[in-house]
Amino acid sequence: MHVLVFCAAAIAATWPLILHPARAIAGGFGDPLLNTFILAWDADRARHLFRGLWDAPFLYPHRHTFAYSEHLLGIALFTAPVEWISRRPILTYNVAYISSYAFAGLGMFLLVRSLVGRTDAALLAGLAFELTPYRLAQTTHLQVLMNGWMPVGLWALHQYFRTGSRRWLAGFAASFVLLGLSNGYYFYFFLIPAGVVAVVETARPPHRRARTTIDLLVAGLVVVAVVAPIAWVYLRLQREAGFVRSDEELAGLSARLGDYFRVPRGGWTWRGLLTVGGGERELFHGFTVIAFAALAVCVCRSRVVATYLAVTALAVWLSMGPGGGPLYAWLFRVVPGFNGLRVPARFSSVVIVGLAVLAGAGFAWVLARLPRRAGVAAAIATAAIIVLEGQHGVEVADVPAANVKSWDRVAYEWLRMQPAGAAIELPITQQDDFHPFTLTYQLETLRHGHPIVNGYSGWKSMLQELLGGAASPLRDPALMGSALEGLQAIGVRYVLLHEELFPAQDDAAALVDAIDTARAQIVEGQRFGRTRVWRLRSTASASDDGRLTRLDPRALTLDASQQQGRLPLVVDGDRDTRWVSGDAQSGGEWLAVRLSRAIDVGRIQLETAQRSLADYPRRLTIESIDEAGHAHVLFDRPIVDRLIEAMAIDERYPVMNIDLPPNRTVRLRISQTAQAPNWWAVHELTVWQR
């Protein structure tokens, strides 16, 4: 009966999603579709014993792209059978989404009933937790909604302290693991309520204190041992790829006290009494839960109230991030992985745990003092208010191309039958310029099995940012051949173009013409309705690194067409300093290198950096001047292919290698000979002798 109450509340809160669970989604097409892909990928890898789990088929050529966001394994353990049977990722996601509501309510019901001993009060606390307006604010974040494991874990922990049974402690540890595997934030967040409960209960008049301490230590080690292999992937990625948030980034994503009285768009504002918040700062949990929690604090002198008041206060404090004081800053610096948490305000998911338990105590205090009939009426009225101020249905929309037959599907079926190789799909956009088709591409990789350059996740691929941005070589027909060469060199074998997705059809036609013109890179082309597909040639890069010697930068004399004062920065060994032309590329910019003697220059290296990716030279001419003063052109073409190859190796500091034919050089002139709105930037210049 109690389960049915929470299931009914979940259906009502997410209405009308239940009417079209296989083709509609709540909250928009950003993170919900990303989480749809993640759950489907989890299910796919589970069928293969999780081989290749971290190398998800998007944002090629990056490795471990699955760790660019939450892995949701704690959710997928339960939803994978739905995906295996239905083969409908949208349905699988919606099962998890709606279930997260019901599970949250049931978990809080179990916790509060065990603490206050009243079923009616526990039902109200469960509804308050399940239908908090904060859940509406987090509609797009399934991982945040999956906080039902918190009250379940606390219920098991309290039962362990009450009975001493290690089976309950095992239940707590399992809940902790599943919670953290559903949302990596919660590995850190849940330490607050679990730690407070453990400290309070262990500090009680001594009985089994030594045994309890050992038990808790063992449980903690088990949790760490289970999650360590996964945590190691994220920590290694943080270190190798530089995926770390700065404390300055957290200011706009940290809470202020006033945010706890801001509602999400679509939430009940109590006729304008409350204001609508924005971003991650819509933290209102409802006047009902706040009022009854305050009542409990005032009238209930119990260990439970004191414990969960401490939990609530600590969570509110930490939700303020660095602005709340030195504690968060210390955790940010010291605790491994803590500096990867982007949104301190999400500690609000712990705040509602504390408030719901406190409100449960308040509900119990009031209901215990009312006659039975009056108590039932009061409980029903309170539940109605909770529903009123909590949820009014979410925004639901049909997913583009979900389970629809189209020429795209025919093209993807053709791609599925082709040999291994990565693909790029056009149009391609930058991550912040989000379009739902990017995640449609991503979902389709589960059908055709080829990795794609495109993608959407928690971290960006600079290759996608370059190719999808205003400085993209794909926007310039003169650079298309070089861009395709670079894609070939990093393993891209297929180009797909979806004409109907271009806002301007002239742009699609121009892109088709530019690709068709690059015949040297194309093996074959196919047309499926308004979807085009090209197969690129395979290439193999040659290198003669072993026969090259790097020249000492001190042996070079530099000159430039402009900004001569910045020239020392290209040979100072600091990859973050740079020479820039200072003006838009006009075709007349140059750098000159005078050598101390005549040598055979085998290679020029031009190093750039992530902040200068758009400032690449559109076309380079490299001339050698020999002892007699004669000039010889050693290189004359775009270098986009070198840039793309370099980004596949290190996108933070790409190093473009330009190998030169045999020469006898005393002076080298490197000229930028095309036009572009960006200036030309060089972070480091290196000359290699053959």
Image (cartoon, rainbow, N blue to C red):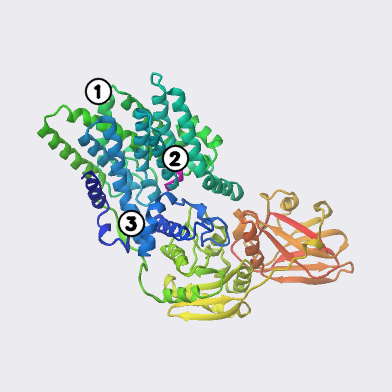
Under tag 3, what secondary structure?
helix
Looking at numbered disc 1 in the image, what kind of residue is underneath it?
Val
Estimate the x, y position of residue 37 in percent, counting from the top left. 43, 59
Image quadrant of residue 605? Answer: bottom right
Closer to us: 429 or 348: 348
Residue at 36% x, 63% y: name it.
85
How many residues crowd around disc 3 within 10 Å: few (fewer than 14), some, or many (20 or more)?
many
Q: Nearer the viewer, mark 3 or mark 1?
A: 3
Estimate the x, y position of residue 61 in percent, counting from the top left. 58, 61
Above or below, comparing residue 565 to residue 195 in the picture: below
Q: Does residue 275 appear in this view?
A: no
Residue at 56% x, 35% y: name it.
334
Image quadrant where one finds the N terminus: top left
Estimate the x, y position of residue 450 in percent, counting from the top left. 52, 68
Residue at 49% x, 73% y: name it.
416
Q: What stretch is highlighted in magenta?
A: 182-189
Closer to us: 414 or 622: 414
Report which residue position mark 1 lands on.
299
Q: How far apart are marks 2 and 1 (CA)?
A: 32 Å
Residue at 50% x, 30% y: name it.
326
Q: Earlier in the sequence, mark 2 or mark 3?
A: 3
Report which residue position mark 2 lands on.
344
Please tell me the numbered disc located at residue 94. 3
Q: Earlier in the sequence, mark 2 or mark 1?
A: 1
Q: Distance between the residues labelled 3 and 1?
A: 42 Å
Q: Is residue 183 magenta?
A: yes
Looking at numbered disc 2 in the image, what kind of residue is underneath it?
Pro
Estimate the x, y position of residue 171 in percent, counting from the top left. 39, 39
Looking at numbered disc 3 in the image, what kind of residue is underneath it?
Asn
Mark 2–mark 3 CB contact (< 8 Å): no
